[in-house]
Image (cartoon, grey):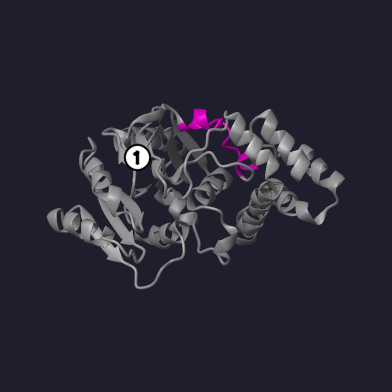
Amino acid sequence: MITILMATYNGESYLAEQIESILRQTETRWKLIIQDDCSTDRTAAVAQEFAGQYPEKIRLIRRDSPSGSAKNNFFSMLSLADTPYCMTCDQDDVWLPEKIALTLEKMRELESACGADTPLLVHTDLKVVDSRLNELSGSLLYIQDLSAKRDALHQLIVQNIVTGCTMMVNQALLARFVPIPEAQNCIMHDWWLAILAAAFGKIGFVETPTILYRQHGSNQVGAKNAHSLSYNWARFRDRAGARTVLRDTYRQAGEFLKVYRAKLDTQQVRLLDAYSGIPLHPKWKRVWVLLRYRLFKKGFKRKLAQILFV
């Protein structure tokens, strides 16, 4: 059995299509919990219509007060996952029919190799589409110039490769999750859980895209084309923004170290301490830390930007 957690906020435009795509899954052993974050449109009403029609499969929870972000909404829901596996779901995509089945197959493969008591995370590639589901790219990883092989701890604290709407985690990983004292230091729920899996377990990847990842004016994250000259030039010119992005990764690594220090091994503590402490050092030592611990993003342009803006 799989618990699907969907965080919603003002998503009435695409919510019905998303839920219908879940109802069409070839793997039917799932339940969907939708937690609405005080929407001001008809999102909760749409969700309630489906919950009323499929009470054995779909449950709606309405928050009494806003969580402040999709990240916080998702984190507050993790304790509701009381099944062997848990998936997180956005409100505006379309799941392809075999998404759950393909992800579950990979999860069971990992459990056979590593044991069900090992914290495990599985994610997949996505097809990028526009608001009307016209394909823009057959692979999110390609358009963002990312590699699913970069799943080691020293790589993930610098650059995330896991998209939350494709993610499945097992109970062993959820058991490792503890409330984050300063959640503002965590960038996104998927990135945090990926780091958790890299530190204590293993990450698996399904190359087949399992989602139509809809791009529209209200995406919280969205797909950026890392191959675009205009995109790269804009990123290079925005030096303050580049430094902010890097600073956020230092803070996240420091928060992870604070939460899990007692359970990490010596090498992991040293790595996280070095990366989170980068802002405390002069420029030459910041670059030395990147080199010493191989703390670089994928691609020449990104590595150059790190060295320039670290």
| Residue type indicated by callout 1 | Ser
Q: Position of residue 254 (x, y in %)?
A: 66, 57
- Residue 294 seen: no
Mark 1, Cα crowd under 10 Å, few <14 / some 14-19 / many 20+, is some
Q: Residue at x 82, y 41 (%)?
A: 288
Give, as a single range, the part of the protein colored magenta. Answer: 140-156
State yes or no: residue 147 in magenta.
yes
Q: Position of residue 5 (x, y in %)?
A: 34, 53
Q: Position of residue 211 (x, y in %)?
A: 35, 36
Q: Residue at x 62, y 59 (%)?
A: 255
Q: Quadrant of residue 108?
A: top left
Q: Nearer the viewer, residue 104 or 276?
A: 276
Residue 162 position (above or below residue 33): above
Q: Nearer the viewer, residue 184 or 237?
A: 237
**Farthest residue, direction bottom:** 64
Residue located beneath label 1 in the image:
131
Q: Residue at x 29, y 64 (%)?
A: 61
Q: Is residue 131 left or right of residue 20?
A: right
Q: Nearer the viewer, residue 128 or 106?
A: 128
State yes or no: residue 193 in magenta.
no
